[in-house]
Amino acid sequence: MSRLSTMSASPWTPFRYRAFAVLWSAMVISNIGTWMNSVGAGWLMATLDPDPLMVALVQAATTTPIFLLALTAGAVADIVDRRRLLLVVNGLMALVATAMALLVTSGQMTALRLLVSIFLLGCGMAFIAPAWQAIVPQLVPKEALSRAITLHSLGINISRAVGPAVAGVLIVTLGMAAPFAINAASFLAIVAGLLWWRPPTQLTSRLPPEGIFEALRNGLSYVRYSTPVRATLIRAVAIFLFASAYWALLPVIAKTWLGGGARLYGILLGSVGVGAVLGALLLPRIKRQLGADVTVAVGTAGTALVLAAFSLIADPYAAVAASLVAGICWIFVVSSLLVSAQTALPNWVRARGLSVFLTLFFGSMAIGSVIWGKTASELGIDTALLIAAGGALITIPLTWHARLGQGEELDLTPSLHWPDPMVLTEATEERGPVMTIIEYRIAHEDVPQFLTLMREMARARRRSGAVQWGVMEDAADPDLYLEYFIERTWLAHLRHHERVAGTDRAIQERVHRLHRGSAPPSVRHLLAPRGGR
């Protein structure tokens, strides 16, 4: 094996790129503070109001803002400078964490104020998450992206291993305010890393940026018509809805079910982090042998096993072992899903696509937290965990048709092969709608293949901004077929020119090979008449 191939096979390859190494380190430091904050918040709520529903609302208050705001945050991250956005939001989150520490120190923290504070931090995370995920491809070359995403998940779980354990000790030795104060200070690492980093120069559009609502609409349209992205989302919702039972109920499991204290709670979360580190080391080999689909199925089955173990065995040592397994399974699932989502998205819509993933991820976690908290209150913790375990197992066969990793072989870079449209009339950017008509001559025996390819073409057109699409046969000339698609404005059509990907070009070339005319397929652009539609 050559030195180059050995490097590409190493799980540590992304650390050879300084920007990734610096920002990864800053992320780990900041996330240690975040996990300390999470442990402090969960344990503080269990002290202020130990009802399982109130404790579960801590998880819901963390995840609900991301569910509500991630789509908007993704659109913002695709149309503004991502680095500047991350700097501003991290600074604001540091202020919120500082306020939490002061409230706890002064004895003025209440259950309501705690939930509000967590909600505000969740709002910050909603804007950080898609932007942060979207800059990962700027830190490493494409061939190292999968390992960079795995290392990103590894960093989060190293933080999970360290943060909770330290938080448990600090709560016992220094008091409840310590985790919140350290979290406030940890944001400085991210700010310093981002101030040091200079993003590589990328190809910029000559067109004005999209408005926020247009960006949202185009992002959702891309996700809707991207088969690889939709498959990833189906698998994500299925597992996270049931896996949320573990995260939502863990504080009350540690305190009520296992009869432990803050130290045990921190150890359980730390065990999850240790398991995730082990999982990250195993994941490249597991995925090579099993593939992404089986890897996620194994992680889902393992999560169900953990939930069942917690419901049946009320022993702290067994709980620590089960948490170790939970961490391994969690990184198997989350890393595989994130790689599947990242590789299915081009850069122009990356943050928006990832924001949809995060919206469904955290939405499932938030809804699941409330469901499992209420179930535990009504039926008991053990019953709620068993129901969640059974549901997780059922999702494996139900979602098996949604295959992961479909985007890994796609060329999503802009092909830029469309020529500038020839327009003799005045075509201002706001004028619309715009209809594009393409004429094909197709032999009778090629029609079935042509129509099959045109269904792929329809999805490609809609992913890049078309709001209507169709193909028609000429009644007077049966060999003549007209494809048409409509966009809202001339500016939207010009953006379509910039967004056509290499994969879309390949589909077009296959269609053009079926064209029997002596000249290439003719293209016409029709504009709405001046003076109104």
Image (cartoon, rainbow, N blue to C red):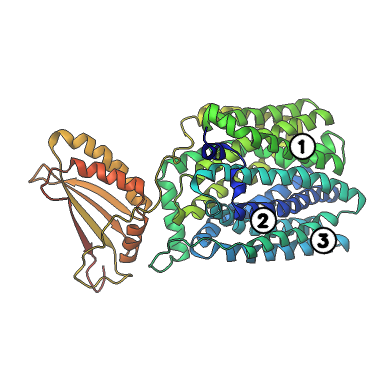
Residue marked by disc 1: 271
Vertical position of residue 344 compared to residue 402: above or below = below
Residue type beneath disc 1: Ser
Q: Which mark is residue 122?
A: 2
Q: Is residue 287 left or right of residue 124?
A: left
Between tags 2 and 1, which lies in front? Answer: 1
Q: Quadrant of the C terminus?
A: bottom left
Q: Which residue is mark 3?
A: 101
Residue 373 seen in render = no
Mark 2 or 3 closer to N-term? 3
- Circle 2: is it few (<14), some (14-19), or many (20+) Cα within 10 Å? many
Residue 142 shows up from this direction:
yes
C-alpha span from label 2 to label 1 = 24 Å
- Give the SS element for disc 3: helix
Dot 2: what SS? helix
The amino acid pointed to by label 2 is Gly
For the residues marked 3 and 1, what is the alpha-carbon distance in whole angstroms? 26 Å
Q: Are marks 2 and 1 in contact (CB under 8 Å)?
A: no
